[in-house]
Amino acid sequence: MAKNDIHGGRKVTLKLPYLEMHIVDHCNLNCELCSHFSNLAPKRFIELEWFHKQLVRLLEVVGSIERLALLGGEPTLHPQLLDFVHLSRKYLPGAHIEIATNGILLGRMGSDFWEALSRNGVALRITYYPKMPPGADRKAVARLAAEYGVSCRVQDVGKNKDWFYLLNTKGDSDPIVAFANCPSKFCHTLYEGRFYLCPRPAYIHFWNMVHTEPIQVTWSDYVEIFRDDARRAMERYLGKISRSEPLEFCRWCPERRQSAKWVSAAVRRHSTSVSRKVLGWLQRG
Ligand SMILES: C[S@@+](CC[C@H](N)C(=O)[O-])C[C@H]1O[C@@H](n2cnc3c(N)ncnc32)[C@H](O)[C@@H]1O
Ligand code: SF4
Ligand code: SF4
């Protein structure tokens, strides 16, 4: 449950219960209705130095982060993944840190990967999808995680995890209702120097790239963390949650959670050699 620690105007450390950061924008799967619009995102690996700068600045602004998820897109595509692991642990020594992944590449990871996760106490949060390439060997992954003592939480779309619609493209939802029923409002996101309550406005520019009617993000939907007054802006912004005040952006989200069928689109515009292999399989499947 997200809450901030401002009591009676007394300024204390703001505690962020949960934060998500992309280390890769694109993906090697192509889920329609991806909540980060990574199925539409151009290929981009986040630079370690930029990640570092944003994390350090956010810590100056909020004081502490209890849980950090490194994700994307698909974070295991990043060639410097382990540098992100070390850096995150260095700055968040007591936090729960996890890598959220579709698991496709885990079976190919070497001992350096498993040892680094084990040594840094970094967990895996794996989402398995109804269509996975044959290389995604779930049993091998479970065996390796157990062998190296890496904590591993598995969600299986269609079994113990629901899939749902993301947008009301008419933009006429009642924002209070959409916000009240929103399952994503605690998935706080730091992206491109801006802090957002949820991933939707953070990544909507990927959706806008391929649609003629853009969905607008307004200044009140986020906090610019590098501004001098970021601390005060953050207090006001996080206060929205405790007062159940929606973002302006909430009018673009469905008022009620609506289940959808998971499908992967056949063609990706921005594929890597790995994702081409995966997609080759999906297209045949
Ligand atoms: C955007 S993904 C990024 C990490 C990784 N690629 C993965 O799929 O686990 C983060 C989480 O969002 C979930 N997600 C994305 N779109 C969703 C949707 N439309 N409905 C429900 N969950 C969704 C994914 O299943 C995953 O658990
Ligand atoms: S695996 Fe699916 S949900 Fe995860 S980032 Fe890729 S496209 Fe999005
Ligand atoms: S914009 Fe509002 S309703 Fe939409 S995901 Fe974010 S918090 Fe939820």
Image: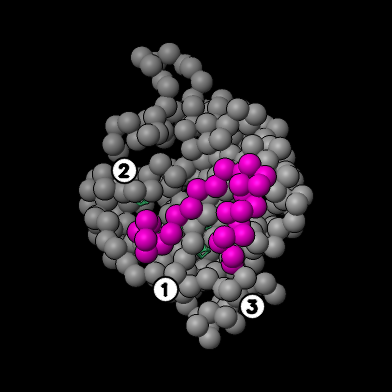
Residue at the spot 44% in from the left edge and 69% down from the top edge: 130
Task: Return the mark for residue 276.
Answer: 3
Marks 1 and 3 close (CB-CB < 8 Å): no
Quarter-of-image position of residue 136: bottom right
Q: Is 133 drawn above or below residue 60 in the view shown?
A: below
Marks 1/2: CA–CA distance? 30 Å
User: Mark 1 or 3 closer to N-term?
Assistant: 1
Marks 1/3: CA–CA distance? 17 Å
User: Mark 3 or 2 closer to N-term?
Assistant: 2
Tag 2 secondary structure: loop
Q: Which residue is mark 1?
A: 263
Tag 1 secondary structure: loop
Tag 3 secondary structure: helix
Asked whether residue 73 appears in the rendered view, the answer is no
Residue 156 lies within the magenta run: yes
Which of discs 1 and 2 lies nearer the camera? The answer is 1
Few, some or many C-alpha atoms within 10 Å of disc 2 (few <14, some 14-19, many ≥20)? many
Marks 1 and 2 close (CB-CB < 8 Å): no
Cβ of mark 2 under 8 A from ligand 3 = yes
Residue type at the position of mark 2? Pro
Image quarter of the N terminus? top left
